[in-house]
Image: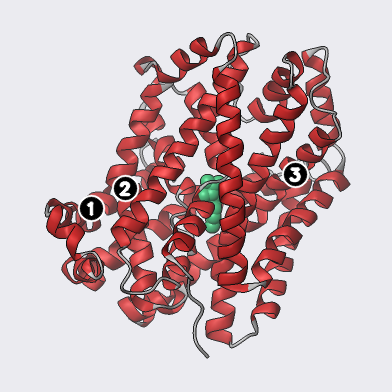
Amino acid sequence: MNRASWGSRLGFILAVAGSAVGLANIWRFPYLVGYHGGAAFIILYFICLALIGFPTFIAEILIGRSTQTNPDSAFRQLGGKNWSWGGKLTIITGFIVASFYSAVAGWILGYFIEAALGNLHLFTEPNQVVDYHSTLMNTPWWGVLFHFIFMMGATSVLFFGVRNGIERGNKIMMPLLFVILFLLVAQGLSMPNAKEGLTFLFYPDWSVITPATFLIALSQAFFTLSVGQGTLVTYGSYLKKEENLITSAFPIIIIDTLVSILASVAVFTIVFSTGLKPDAGPDLLFHTLPWAFSQITGGYFLAFLFFLLVTIAALTSEISALEPLIAWLVDEKGWKRTKAVLVAGLGAFCLGIPSALSFNLLKEHTWQDQTFFDWTHWLASDLLIPIGGILAVILVGWKWGADKAINHLMQGASVTFKRSPWLKIYFKFCFKYCSPFLILLVFLSIIGLFR
Ligand code: PFF
């Protein structure tokens, strides 16, 4: 049987952009910027993107494109039998991410329904917003129900396959996402105190930057680019070998970064115009924004559009986190796609239940003061994703060999490399030295070596 592939270059770009653009762009990026010195954080983030994020992103898609198979067998083909474990690990990471990501996205979907019902723009006191949020969070069935509905949404797209499901789904959802985002930015910019919001966003406050901020910027770059979790290898494996990888991948980085910045513009201008500050951490989404929506005319539509935007972004990411396991079950176990989708979706749903319950029923069930959600989130984001990323660059830079890998990268991209000969040096330097070294440094500091 022929292996699945993308129908067009645009399909690939939108699918990978759909994976990349998610909660980390629209929720996490604005509050990180709000907390860590505005433009100072953005500059740090750009450095992480250029030296680590982009090369790792390219390395993973390249692994997939040149082997045309799932991460397990891709790692085996390029690195030998022992490397298969690395590939399997990235698939497991994607699966774990899919579980808690859906639990969190479930709240967003739930909030979208609340917004649609007209419940998120009529608060008359800030306390009401906080109470409303904690009532919902303290209702166990609410989180689990929306976690389930969200997972159903993701699996129903996946059922239809790579071209008719993932590609078509992203071709519909991503343009919708851009339209909503532009509407929100336009609205934000037309608000009375928009300038203050923009100043806060684009003024670099270096005084709050510490070495830890660098780690946060890097983990943000990794998580938002969907690096280290089998997704990019798998999506790359559906790409035809003659595609120009550089000109296909570069727009994705631009889209992802632009969405993060535009989402921050929308959030900051709206929040500032109501006299609030966007430095509330994760509560930005559930406390600050609904309060801001209650202060302005058109709050109903803004709340509706905003939570729709975040739901769509999360859905296209969730789909991509599940796909590596599905591809593995189909390629390695010979399963039918429908069975693979069902098992992967059901498995991620079940593993996500304790995460969804970590904020109510299982709140007191902690280990070393951390809930189940905290542990799975830490395990995947801080431990497994950097490991997956470093394995991919070491595989490409050392085991497969940087020169050979770059030759493969040049397939379909010879014109680009001729036009920009420095690209060869850049990739060789990053694949071999810069990215592995920096990821290792980050990893060691995450596990507490430099404390
Ligand atoms: N890149 C997504 C985001 O920015 O929210 C997160 C994500 C997607 C993580 C896909 C993992 C994954 F496999």
The amino acid beneath tag 2 is: Ile
* Disc 1 to disc 2, C-alpha distance: 7 Å
Q: Tell me where residue 249 appears, x and y as whole percent.
A: 36, 55
The nearer-to-camera label among 3 and 2 is 3
Numbered badge on residue 377: none
Q: Which residue is mark 3?
A: 109
Assess disc 2: are there few (<14), some (14-19) or many (≥20) residues with their C-alpha within 10 Å of its C-alpha: many
Numbered badge on residue 52: 2
Q: Residue at x 48, y 47 (%)?
A: 223
The answer to whether mark 1 and mark 3 are in CB contact below 8 A is: no
Against 390, is 360 above or below? Answer: above
* SS category of the residue bearing label 2: helix
The answer to whether mark 3 and mark 2 are in CB contact below 8 A is: no
Horizontal arrangement in the rendering, residue 6 relative to residue 346 (left or right): left
Precedes in sequence: disc 1 or disc 3: 3
Against 345, is 269 above or below? Answer: above
Numbered badge on residue 430: 1
The nearer-to-camera label among 1 and 3 is 3
* SS category of the residue bearing label 1: helix
Against 204, is 246 above or below? Answer: below
Query: Would residue 40 be visible to someone looking at this image?
Result: yes
Q: Residue at x 51, y 59 (%)?
A: 15
The answer to whether mark 1 and mark 2 are in CB contact below 8 A is: yes
Assess disc 1: are there few (<14), some (14-19) or many (≥20) residues with their C-alpha within 10 Å of its C-alpha: many
Q: Based on the displayed image, in which of its 4 quarters is residue 75 positioned? A: bottom left
Q: Nearer the viewer, residue 400 or 172?
A: 172
The amino acid beneath tag 3 is: Leu
The answer to whether the beta carbon of the residue marked 1 is less than 8 Å from any atom of ligand 1 is no
